[in-house]
Image (spheres, grey):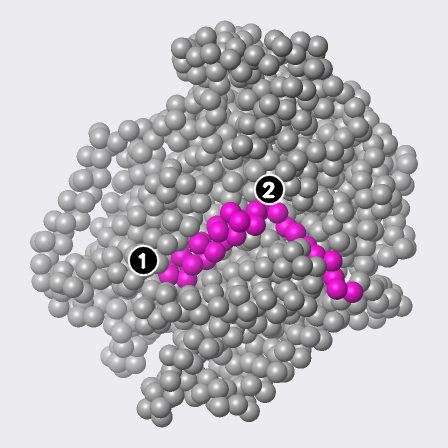
C-alpha cells in the first residue's frame, strides 16, 4: 500500500514539474473531492490473475490502477470519480463468461475492459451483446477487426496482429532477407501471424520456406529446429507462455554462430528480463515492439509520464523489484483504453447504464477517427476505424544490443492499415 | 453397498424427492437475481455433464479421464453447423448429440477392451487426441480462440431449456439405472465374473452405457454451445475431463443427485471464495480436502451409508 | 528421409528427455503401485523443486546447494501431505483423488502468490555447448541425462539391495501379506511417497536451467505421468524407465516425419493402441 502511495506522490510531482503547474497539480487529488458527491463511474477489469495469462494479468491490473489514479487526480471522468472493479477470469473462457455477467449484473459496472486472451474475448463477446454493455478488449487478436464479433466489442487501445505484421513485413524483407521460416504457437494467436505475415511477405516477393507450428505446453523445442532448412535468411519467431525462454535458448544452442537473421515478436519475451541466462545469443537480433521497453527509445513526455505512473523503471521492470519485468508492449493498451472511455464518455454525454446513453457511447466511439498523442495515448497517435472497431498505431523494430533493445525503425500508422472487411455499424444496437 | 435392496424399497419416496428437487429448481427462477440465474443455468448444464459421467463411473464402475472429448464433440457438432451452414439451434442440437454418440461408439470399441486404470489412461489419450485435432483443424475450429456463434437466447428461456435438459437427463438416468439394464451394469461393477457367467456380455453392456454417457455429455456440450453462443477447445482440454470426476466424487458417485450437488458446491465454493480473497483456489483446495475427509464417499454417498439407504 | 545427423539429434534429445521424465514420474509410479493412490498433485512436487531451486540459487548463487535443499524441503512437505491428507483417508482410491486435487490447488495458488506468475530460469552451472558435426547440443543437458541415469540406478540399488527396498517391494506386491510379515506398512508408505516426491523435486531442480520454473509446470508432467506409469507397469522402476525412454524417443523421432501437432496425435494413438492390445502392459509382468 505504501508503495502505491509513493507512486502517486512521485507521479504527481513529476507531472507537476513537467507542466510547470506544480502547485496546482499537487492539489489535484482533492480536485474531485467536490465531485465526490456524484456517483462514481464504475469500470470492470476482466483480469487474468490466474492461469496461463497471469503475467500479463498482473501488469494489466497495475496499469489500470495507475490510469485510474491519474484520471481521478485530474478530476475523474465528466467530473465523476472512477472506481475500478476487478474480477479474475482464470484465463478461462467459461470463467470469463461468469465474470463478465458478474461485473455487469452484480457489480453493475458501466464498462468492461482489458481482456487479453482471445479465447476469453471470443467467448465473452456474445455476452456483451446480450448484456448490452460496451466491452473494450486489449487483446491484439484479429478477432475484433475481422467482423466476427459484434457491435458491443471494441479494441481501441492496441493495434491488432494483422496490422502489426503488415507494418513490419516490408522492413524485414528489405533488411533481413527473402527466404523466411516461421515458428509460431499452434493456436489462434499464432494463426494470425501465420496467415497475415505469409500474405504480406508473398506480396513483397519473399518466400516462406517453412511453417513450424509448436503445440501448446511443449517444453522442449530441439526436435522442431531440423524442420528449418539450412539456407534460410530469416527465422520469424513468435512464442508465448512459460516456455519461451527455453525456446530462445534452444534455438541458440541449435544454430550457434551459424544462425540466420532472427526477427521475433516481443510477445515471446514480455515479462522476461533480457539479461536472463541463456538469452546471450539474441544479441544482434531484431524484435517488434509496440512500445519500447527501455527508457529513452521513444523519448516523449507522455511516454515518460506513463512509465512513471505505472511504476516502471528505465529497463522496463518494476521500480520496486528489478526482476519483475513488465509486459510493456501490451499494457499501455489498458491505459489508452481507459482514456478512450474517458474521452468518449465526456464527448457522448454518457451518464448511466441506460440504452440511450450506451447508444450515444457506441455511436460516438464509432464516429471517432483518431486519438491524439498525449497523456492518454503515450504509445503515439491512433487512427480508429469505426467500421471494424479497431485502432491502428505506429510500430517499432528494435535490435538487441548489450542485452537491451534499441529502436532501429519506426513504422508509420499508414503502413499498418488494411482495407476493412466488415462494418459493425450496420448491426442493430 | 447394498444398493439392490435400497432400490426396491421407497420407490415413491425416490421419485418424490427428484420431482421435488426439479420443482424447487423451477421455483428458483422467480427468486434468483439475474446474475445467479446465469450461474444456476450453467450449474444445470454442467450437472447434466456430470450425470452423464456418473452413469459410467458411478453405475458401471469405469473411471474415464477423456469425457471432455464427448462434451466437446457435442459442442463442435452443434456449433460448427450453426457457424458455417447457418443451421438453426433446434436443428443443430441433435447433430451435436449424434456426433458425440458416434464418437463414444467408436472410441468405446478399443477403449472398452480395457478396464480399471488402463481404461482411464486409454480414455485420457483419446481425449488428448480430440484436443489436438481441434488444433490440427484450426482453420475450421480456430482452436483455443474458438468461434462466437450468431445466436441469442433470452436468459430466462435459457434457464428453462437448461432445466428441461437436466430434468430429462436426471429422470432418464434414474430410469436407466433402475431398469434391468442398469442392474446388469451395477452387477458388472460389483461382480464382473458372476454377471458374465449369468450370460451377460460385459463388453456389450459397457459399450451401450458408454454410448449413452457420451451422448448425454454431448447434449450438455451442445446445449452449452448453443445457449452461450461459443465453441472453443478449452472445453476439450484434460481439465474438462477432470472436472466431472471431481464433481461426481464430491457429490457422491453412484448417487442420482450427487452430480448436481457436486457441481453446485464446487461452483459456489469458487464464487464465494473469489469474493473473499485473491487466493481463492487455496480456499477451494482446502475445502475439498476437508470435505472429502468428512464425506469420503462424496456427500450423498456418505449420507446414504450413514442411514439414507433408500437414496438412489 | 531425415539425415543421419537429424536421427542422431532426435535420439539424443529423446534420451535426455526420457531419463528426466523417468526421474520425474517415478514417484507417481510409487504412489500408484505401493500406496495404490492416484496422486494428482505429483506434478506439483516437480514444480516446487524448480521454484525452490530458483529461490535458493537466487539467494545464495549456489546450484549444488539448491540440489540438496529443494528436494529436502519437498520431501518434508510430502511427509506432511501424507500425514495430514492421505493417512486420514486411509489411502482410499477415490477420496484421495479429490484430496490431492485440493492439494494441487493449494500448492499452485500459494506458489502464484509467493513466487509470482513469471517463468524464471537460472544459469546452468556450466554452459558449454557440445558441437556435433551437424548441430550443437547443450552440455548441461547431457550432464542432466547422466545424473538422472545415476539417480535412477541408485534407486534401483536401494530397491533391490536394502531392507527398505525389500519392504517396499513386499508392500507393492501384497500389502496384507506385508502387514502379516511385520512390515510397518504405514512407514513404508510415507517413505515411498517422500522418496518419490524428492525425486520429482530433483528433476525440477535439474530442469530450471533448461526450462525455467513456472507455477503451472506441474500440470504438463501429470499427463505424461499417467501414460508412463501405465505403460511401464505400476510401481515398477525398470518399467517406468523403459516407458519414459520410449515416450521420449517416440516424441522426438515422430516429430521428424510429421508436423508437430500431428506427431503428438500419432504418438498418443500408438501408446493407446499398445495399452489396448497388450493388456498385461509391455513390462508389467516381468517388473522387478
Near-viewer residue (C124 or A101): C124
Near-viewer residue (A32 or A106): A32
Residue C63 visible in the snapshot: yes
- From what the image shows, is residue A400 above or below residue C111? above
Q: Residue at x 67, y 44 (%)?
A: A323
Q: Residue at x 42, y 50 (%)?
A: B282
Is A381 magenta? The answer is no
Residue highlighted by disc 1 = B290
Near-viewer residue (C120 or A291): C120
Disc 2 from disc 1: Cα separation: 31 Å
Is C118 magenta? The answer is yes
Q: Residue at x 71, y 19 (%)?
A: A302
How crowded pointer 2 is (Cα within 10 Å; few <14, some 14-19, many 20+) is rated as: many
Pinpoint the chain carrying mark 2: A
> Which numbered tag is attached to residue A410?
none
Q: Position of residue A215 (x, y in %)?
A: 64, 53
Q: Position of residue A255 (x, y in %)?
A: 84, 56
Q: With A178 as the anchor, is C155 left or right in this view?
A: left
Q: Residue at x 56, y 38 (%)?
A: A57
> Which numbered tag is attached to residue A55?
2
Q: Which residues are magenta?
A: C98-126
Instruction: Identify the image quadrant of the N terminus of chain C.
Output: bottom right
Same subunit: marks 2 and 1? no
Secondary element at tag 2: helix
Near-viewer residue (C110 or A154): C110
Q: Position of residue A246 (x, y in %)?
A: 71, 55
Pinpoint the chain carrying mark 1: B
- From what the image shows, is residue A276 above or below residue C218? above
Location of residue C181 (image quadrant): bottom left
Amino acid at each position: 500500500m505504501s508503495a502505491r502511495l509513493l507512486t502517486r506522490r512521485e507521479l504527481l510531482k513529476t507531472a507537476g514539474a513537467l507542466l510547470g503547474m506544480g502547485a496546482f497539480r499537487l492539489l489535484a487529488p482533492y480536485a474531485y473531492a467536490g465531485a465526490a458527491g456524484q456517483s462514481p463511474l464504475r469500470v470492470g477489469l476482466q483480469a487474468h490473475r490466474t492461469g496461463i495469462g497471469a503475467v500479463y494479468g498482473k501488469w494489466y491490473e497495475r496499469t489500470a490502477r495507475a490510469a485510474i489514479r491519474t484520471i481521478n487526480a485530474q478530476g475523474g471522468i465528466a467530473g465523476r470519480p472512477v472506481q475500478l472493479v476487478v474480477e479474475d477470469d482464470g484465463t478461462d473462457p467459461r470463467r470469463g463468461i461468469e465474470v463478465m455477467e458478474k461485473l455487469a449484473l452484480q457489480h453493475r459496472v458501466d464498462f468492461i475492459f482489458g481482456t487479453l486472451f482471445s479465447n476469453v474475448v471470443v467467448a465473452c463477446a456474445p455476452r456483451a451483446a446480450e448484456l448490452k454493455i460496451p466491452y473494450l478488449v486489449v487483446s491484439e487478436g484479429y478477432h475484433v477487426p475481422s467482423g466476427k464479433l459484434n457491435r458491443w466489442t471494441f479494441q481501441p487501445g492496441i493495434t491488432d496482429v494483422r496490422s502489426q505484421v503488415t507494418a513490419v513485413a516490408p522492413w524485414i524483407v528489405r533488411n533481413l532477407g527473402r527466404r523466411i521460416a516461421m515458428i509460431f504457437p499452434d493456436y489462434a494467436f499464432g494463426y494470425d501471424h501465420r496467415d497475415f505475415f505469409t500474405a504480406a511477405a508473398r506480396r513483397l516477393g519473399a518466400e516462406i520456406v517453412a511453417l513450424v507450428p509448436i503445440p501448446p505446453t511443449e517444453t522442449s523445442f530441439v526436435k522442431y529446429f531440423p524442420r528449418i532448412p539450412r539456407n534460410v535468411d530469416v527465422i520469424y519467431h513468435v512464442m508465448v507462455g512459460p516456455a519461451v525462454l527455453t525456446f530462445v535458448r534452444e534455438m541458440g544452442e541449435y544454430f550457434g554462430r551459424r544462425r540466420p537473421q532472427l526477427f521475433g515478436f516481443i510477445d515471446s519475451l514480455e515479462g522476461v528480463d533480457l539479461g536472463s541466462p541463456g538469452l546471450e545469443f539474441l544479441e544482434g537480433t531484431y524484435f517488434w515492439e509496440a512500445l519500447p521497453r527501455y527508457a529513452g527509445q521513444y523519448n516523449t513526455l507522455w511516454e515518460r509520464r506513463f512509465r512513471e505512473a505505472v511504476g516502471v523503471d528505465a529497463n522496463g521492470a518494476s521500480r520496486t523489484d528489478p526482476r519483475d519485468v513488465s509486459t510493456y508492449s501490451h499494457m499501455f493498451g489498458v491505459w489508452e483504453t481507459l482514456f478512450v472511455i474517458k474521452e468518449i464518455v465526456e464527448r457522448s454525454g454518457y451518464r448511466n447504464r441506460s440504452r440511450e446513453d450506451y447508444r450515444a457511447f457506441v455511436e460516438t466511439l464509432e464516429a471517432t477517427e483518431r486519438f491524439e498523442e498525449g497523456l492518454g495515448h503515450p504509445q503515439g497517435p491512433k487512427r480508429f476505424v469505426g467500421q471494424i472497431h479497431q485502432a491502428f498505431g505506429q510500430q517499432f523494430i528494435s535490435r538487441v544490443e548489450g542485452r537491451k533493445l534499441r529502436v532501429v525503425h519506426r513504422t508509420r500508422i499508414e503502413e499498418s492499415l488494411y482495407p476493412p472487411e466488415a462494418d459493425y455499424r450496420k448491426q442493430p444496437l | 453397498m447394498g444398493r439392490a435392496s435400497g432400490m426396491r424399497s421407497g420407490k415413491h419416496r425416490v421419485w418424490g424427492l427428484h420431482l421435488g428437487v426439479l420443482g424447487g429448481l423451477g421455483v428458483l427462477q422467480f427468486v434468483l437475481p439475474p446474475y445467479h440465474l446465469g450461474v444456476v443455468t450453467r450449474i444445470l448444464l454442467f450437472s447434466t455433464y456430470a450425470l452423464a459421467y456418473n452413469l459410467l463411473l458411478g453405475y458401471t464402475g469405469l473411471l474415464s479421464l477423456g469425457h471432455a472429448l464427448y462434451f466437446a464433440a457435442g459442442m463442435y457438432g452443434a456449433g460448427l453447423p450453426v457457424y458455417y451452414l447457418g443451421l438453426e439451434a433446434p436443428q443443430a442440437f441433435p447433430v451435436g448429440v449424434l456426433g458425440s454418440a458416434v464418437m463414444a461408439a467408436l472410441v468405446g470399441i478399443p477403449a472398452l477392451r480395457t478396464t480399471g486404470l488402463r481404461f482411464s489412461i486409454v480414455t485420457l489419450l483419446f481425449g488428448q487426441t480430440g484436443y489436438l485435432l481441434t488444433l490440427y483443424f484450426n482453420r475450421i475450429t480456430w482452436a483455443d480462440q474458438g468461434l462466437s456463434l450468431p445466436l441469442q437466447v433470452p436468459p430466462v428461456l435459457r434457464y428453462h431449456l437448461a432445466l428441461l435438459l437436466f430434468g430429462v437427463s436426471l429422470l432418464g438416468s434414474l430410469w436407466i439405472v433402475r431398469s434391468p439394464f442398469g442392474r446388469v451394469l451395477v452387477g458388472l461393477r460389483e461382480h464382473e465374473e458372476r454377471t458374465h457367467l449369468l450370460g451377460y456380455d460385459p463388453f456389450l453392456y459397457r459399450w451401450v452405457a458408454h454410448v449413452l454417457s457420451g451422448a448425454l455429455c454431448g447434449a450438455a456440450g451442445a446445449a452449452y454451445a448453443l445457449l452461450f453462443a461459443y465453441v472453443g477447445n478449452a472445453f476439450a482440454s484434460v481439465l474438462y475431463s477432470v472436472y466431472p470426476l471431481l464433481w461426481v466424487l464430491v457429490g457422491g458417485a453412484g448417487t442420482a443427485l450427487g452430480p448436481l450437488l457436486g457441481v453446485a458446491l464446487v461452483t459456489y465454493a469458487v464464487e464465494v471464495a473469489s469474493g473473499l480473497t485473491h487466493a481463492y483456489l487455496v480456499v477451494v483446495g482446502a475445502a475439498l480436502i476437508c470435505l472429502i475427509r468428512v464425506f469420503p464417499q462424496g456427500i450423498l454417498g456418505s449420507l446414504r451409508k450413514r442411514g439414507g439407504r433408500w437414496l438412489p | 528421409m531425415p539425415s543421419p545427423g537429424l536421427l542422431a539429434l532426435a535420439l539424443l534429445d529423446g534420451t535426455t528427455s526420457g531419463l528426466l521424465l523417468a526421474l520425474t514420474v517415478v514417484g507417481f509410479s510409487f504412489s500408484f503401485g505401493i500406496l495404490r493412490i492416484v496422486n494428482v498433485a505429483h506434478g506439483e512436487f516437480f514444480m516446487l523443486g524448480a521454484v525452490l531451486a530458483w529461490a535458493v540459487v537466487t539467494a545464495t548463487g549456489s546450484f549444488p546447494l539448491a540440489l540438496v535443499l529443494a528436494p529436502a524441503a519437498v520431501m518434508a512437505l510430502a511427509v506432511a501431505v501424507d500425514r495430514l491428507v492421505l493417512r486420514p483417508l486411509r489411502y482410499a482410491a477415490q477420496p484421495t483423488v479429490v484430496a490431492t486435487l485440493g492439494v494441487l490447488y493449494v500448492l499452485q495458488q500459494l506458489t502464484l502468490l509467493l513466487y509470482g506468475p513469471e517463468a524464471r530460469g537460472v544459469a546452468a552451472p556450466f554452459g558449454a555447448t557440445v558441437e556435433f558435426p551437424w548441430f550443437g547440443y547443450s552440455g548441461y543437458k547431457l550432464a542432466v541425462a547422466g545424473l538422472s541415469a545415476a539417480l535412477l540406478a541408485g534407486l534401483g540399488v536401494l530397491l533391490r539391495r536394502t531392507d527398505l527396498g525389500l519392504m517396499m517391494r513386499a508392500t507393492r506386491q501384497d500389502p496384507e501379506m506385508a502387514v502379516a510379515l511385520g512390515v510397518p506398512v504405514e512407514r513404508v508408505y510415507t517413505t515411498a511417497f517422500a522418496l518419490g516426491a524428492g525425486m520429482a523435486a530433483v528433476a525440477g531442480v535439474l530442469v530450471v536451467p533448461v526450462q525455467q520454473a513456472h507455477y503451472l509446470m506441474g500440470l504438463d508432467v501429470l499427463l505424461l505421468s499417467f501414460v508412463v506409469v501405465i505403460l511401464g507397469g505400476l510401481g515398477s522402476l525398470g518399467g517406468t524407465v523403459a516407458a519414459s525412454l520410449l515416450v521420449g524417443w517416440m516424441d522426438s523421432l515422430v516429430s521428424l516425419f510429421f508436423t508437430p501437432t500431428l506427431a503428438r496425435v500419432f504418438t498418443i494413438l500408438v501408446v493407446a493402441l499398445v495399452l489396448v492390445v497388450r493388456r498385461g502392459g509391455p513390462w508389467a509382468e516381468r517388473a522387478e
